[in-house]
């Protein structure tokens, strides 16, 4: 089931304004630039691969996402990327990519271990031997959900001039690693506010490593929010884990 934020066209078109390009995106873009063939899993609005193409990437770039509304935004950006609607169950890639990317906390949107293992197994098959996987996660030690709330609302001006206020709230109580949340959207021109609900799984670095290693990957390095190399297991807010396919 796709969260409404990603599946509703009127909400999806605000995604980039609410989630501006940041250090994690820049780090992933650098790695994309050094790979000949790249799959972006949960590519969303396609800004990572579109930017890679614009700055001169001449190889195969493929974005996969289960939300049609997000791919509408991606296709508007560029036709120079292969945009695929679906999930990893819909494709049968076998040793086709040098690099796979799961940015935007995509792996955390798979809260169950079984579905996460299934996705990672499919990615291992999709990568060539020695290919790399980038996994972007939020560090649970920072308890990022405690900073969510209306006081952190962002405003987006839509093409018709209306202003939408948007924010995320954790749904209490927070239980273990799973954090349920609601994204709220409010606009004076709407009859009522809109919302989208979902769950994020906050795994400790050691648990993430075990998950990756169980799927046949070797964890090589971990980078913090500004691309700083971090000791294995240290993690950090907006951490990117780099794993190699065995």
Image (cartoon, rainbow, N blue to C red):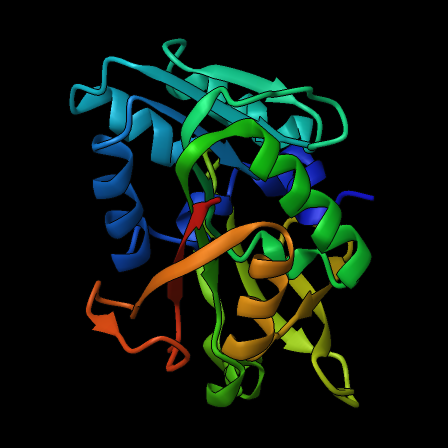
Up-down relation of residue 175 to residue 41 (above or below): below
Quadrant hosting residue 112? bottom right
Work out whether residue 69 or residue 142 is closer to the camera in this orientation and state it: 142
Q: Is residue 133 left or right of residue 91?
A: left
Q: Residue at x 40, y 36 (%)?
A: 131
Work out whether residue 77 or residue 233 is closer to the camera in this orientation and state it: 233
Quadrant hosting residue 150? bottom right
The answer to whether any part of residue 25 appears in the image is yes
Residue 239, x across and y down, in percent: 38, 67
Residue 224, x across and y down, in percent: 29, 70
Up-down relation of residue 79 to residue 127 (above or below): above
Work out whether residue 43 or residue 14 is closer to the camera in this orientation and state it: 43
Q: Quadrant of the N terminus?
A: top right
Q: How many marks?
A: 0
Residue 101, x across and y down, in percent: 45, 42
Q: Residue at x 36, y 28 (%)?
A: 49
Q: Residue at x 59, y 21 (%)?
A: 94
Residue 52, x across and y down, in percent: 26, 28
The answer to whether any part of residue 193 appears in the image is no
Quadrant hosting residue 175? bottom right
Q: Residue at x 29, y 14 (%)?
A: 59
Up-down relation of residue 66 to residue 215 (above or below): above
Residue positioned most to the left: 55
């Amino acid at each position: 089931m796709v969260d409404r934020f990603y599946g509703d066209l009127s909400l999806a078109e605000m995604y980039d304004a609410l989630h501006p390009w940041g250090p994690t995106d820049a780090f992933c873009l650098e790695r994309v630039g050094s790979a000949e063939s790249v799959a972006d899993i949960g590519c969303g609005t396609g800004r990572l691969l579109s930017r890679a193409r614009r700055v001169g990437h001449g190889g195969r770039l493929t974005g996969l996402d289960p939300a049609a509304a997000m791919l509408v935004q991606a296709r508007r950006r560029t036709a120079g990327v292969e945009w695929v609607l679906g999930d990893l169950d819909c494709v049968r890639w076998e040793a086709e990519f040098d690099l796979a990317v799961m940015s935007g906390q995509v792996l955390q949107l798979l809260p169950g271990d079984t579905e996460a293992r299934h996705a990672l197994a499919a990615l291992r098959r999709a990568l060539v031997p020695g290919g790399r996987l980038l996994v972007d996660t939020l560090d649970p030690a920072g308890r990022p959900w405690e900073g969510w709330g209306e006081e952190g609302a962002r405003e987006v001006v839509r093409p018709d001039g209306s202003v939408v206020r948007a924010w995320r709230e954790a749904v209490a109580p927070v239980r273990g690693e799973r954090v349920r949340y609601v994204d709220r959207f409010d606009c004076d021109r709407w009859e009522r506010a809109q919302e989208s609900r979902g769950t994020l799984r906050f795994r400790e670095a050691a648990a993430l490593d075990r998950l990756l290693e169980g799927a046949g990957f070797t964890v090589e390095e971990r980078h913090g929010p500004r691309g700083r190399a971090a000791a294995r297991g240290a993690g950090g807010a907006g951490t990117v884990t780099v794993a190699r396919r065995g």
